[in-house]
Amino acid sequence: MSFADLGLSDELLQAVEAAGYSEPTPIQAQAIPPVLMMKDLIGIAQTGTGKTASFVLPMIDVLAHGRRRALMPRSLILEPTRELAAQVADNFVKYGKNHDLRMALLIGGVQMGDQVKALQEGVDVLIATPGRLMDLFERGKILLTGCELLVIDEADRMLDMGFIPDIETICSKLPTNRQTLLFSATMPPVIKKLADRFLENPKYIEVARPASTNTNIAQFKVPVTARKKRDTLREILRTDNVTTAIIFCNRKTTVRELAKSLKRNGFAAGEIHGDMDQSARIAELDCFKSGEINILVASDVAARGLDVKGVSHVFNYDTPWHPDDYVHRVGRTGRGGASGRAFTLVTPDDAEAMENVEKLTGGTIPLFGEAADIEEAVPAFDEAESAPAPRKRASRSKTAASAKAKPAPKAAAKPAPAPVVEETVEADTPAPAPVRRAPRRRTEPTVAAPVLEAAGDWNGPIPDFLAVSAVS
């Protein structure tokens, strides 16, 4: 099947061909015809399946004929984040270049004056985040009574971010005879209730099981201790043929610290998180898209909607708190039929969160190689910092062996028998011979210290083995 078989106009087909696409994805093939027929639609599709074009392309043809009016947009697209809204705007520019359509972008973090001016001149397509749209609506700067088509994109993400009340308010202000399209990766009860209330006899399309991940993505979990997360991440970045990667963290502070750490270790890394203003975030994304940097450390503000071609790897530096976020994070790779790889660093504290992810995706995520391989890849200095328990146990064994020698004066001046200490070290710490033997040089000071300390703190009768000193 080609795009020409879907009923799109010649002008639109030329733009699609110029963008380098010849065949529609499954969601596009199923969604475009009913949208052109002005039907309501529910689209359940995993991220990276071409969902955005499945509503942008038919909307361009639907809106090709009509008249713009001041402050009254003809269509409205609601997006959960600024980045996703900007991406949809880019799609309209790319595919609508042969049509006379005017678009406006309403997002936070930028000056409101230019947005109001665009609305006053009249727009065919209004792309907005719920917060900024509600702000302008309450100020009387926008009227929704002329909206003929509504798109609610990433509905489950809207739910996570608390936008459902705003969406219900917005829907109630729109004409009842509009066309409504709702897209979501999952279909929780709240979203189903929203669809039942505001969509009329919708066409239901599902191109993948809800919450499933792209089959083109090879997924792995990497068991690791919290102390060794950075070293393990750097080792995989160096050895797994990484061309471009997005690394997700749960906290903004972790994003900043990890990005700085990667830069110090020679990686071309950038960062994006919610504390950055919009211009800084756009600048970092532009650097990533242009190849100036090839690693982007991000919080979940960027987990959905980023469409960067050729992302070879996704790393969950932190296991996501919400299982749905896992699906959308790893969906940044393996897009458009390409293959990708996704790694999740799992500490012992992340066990429950990882179990929830595997329940949602419906399968066990395999381990990346053997745990021993990962540990060997970590630099040796990390072992010294973590102070492994086996070495402490070996030290205690030597102390215990020395304590047995205290009653005999001759034994006090003599270290514990070497075979006993060596057996303990070998049993507990399977390390190279030089590492095991180094502590043996400290055997005599280790024996003497407890004896002197005991003598200095003693308040009772003088022990027999110290009686000679007392008499003389």
Image (cartoon, grey):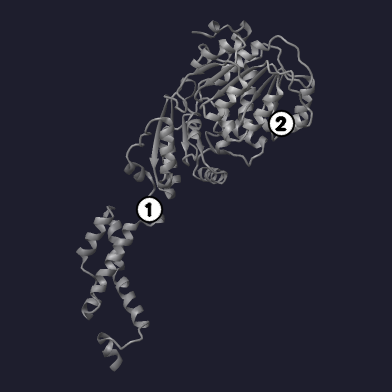
Q: Position of residue 123 (x, y in %)?
A: 74, 19
* Snapshot quadrant of residue 365: top left
Q: Badges 2 and 1: C-beta atoms under 8 Å apart?
A: no
Specify whether residue 360 is in view: yes
| Position above or below: 333 against 454 | above
Question: In the visual, does 41 lie left or right of 387?
Answer: right
Q: Name the residue type under label 2.
A: Met
Q: Secondary structure at mark 2?
A: helix
- Foreground pick, 353 / 269: 353
- The amino acid type of the residue labelled 1 equals Glu
**Disc 1: CA contacts within 10 A as few (<14), some (14-19) or many (>=20):** few
User: In screen coordinates, is 267 left or right of 449?
Assistant: right
Distance of label 2 from label 1 (alpha carbons): 54 Å
Q: Quadrant of the C terminus?
A: bottom left
Image position, residue 22 (x, y; %): 52, 11
- Which x, y percent locates residue 161? 59, 35
Vertical order, 254 against 15 (above or below): below
Alpha-carbon neighbours of circle 2 within 10 Å: few (<14), some, or many (≥20)?
Answer: some
Is residue 279 shown above or below 448?
Answer: above
Q: Identify the residue at horizontal 40%, vertical 52% (top origin).
A: 381
Q: Which residue is mark 1?
A: 383
State the residue in front, 394 or 56.
56
Q: Residue at x 26, y 72 (%)?
A: 402
Look at mark 2 in the image and give the residue it sits on: 134
What is the quadrant of residue 278 in the picture? Answer: top right
The mark closer to the camera, 2 or 1, is 2
Q: In the image, what residue occupies the spot 35% across and 45% down?
A: 375
Say whether disc 2 or disc 1 marks the residue closer to the N-terminus: 2
Residue 230 picture quarter: top left
Nearer to us in this view, 353 or 190: 190
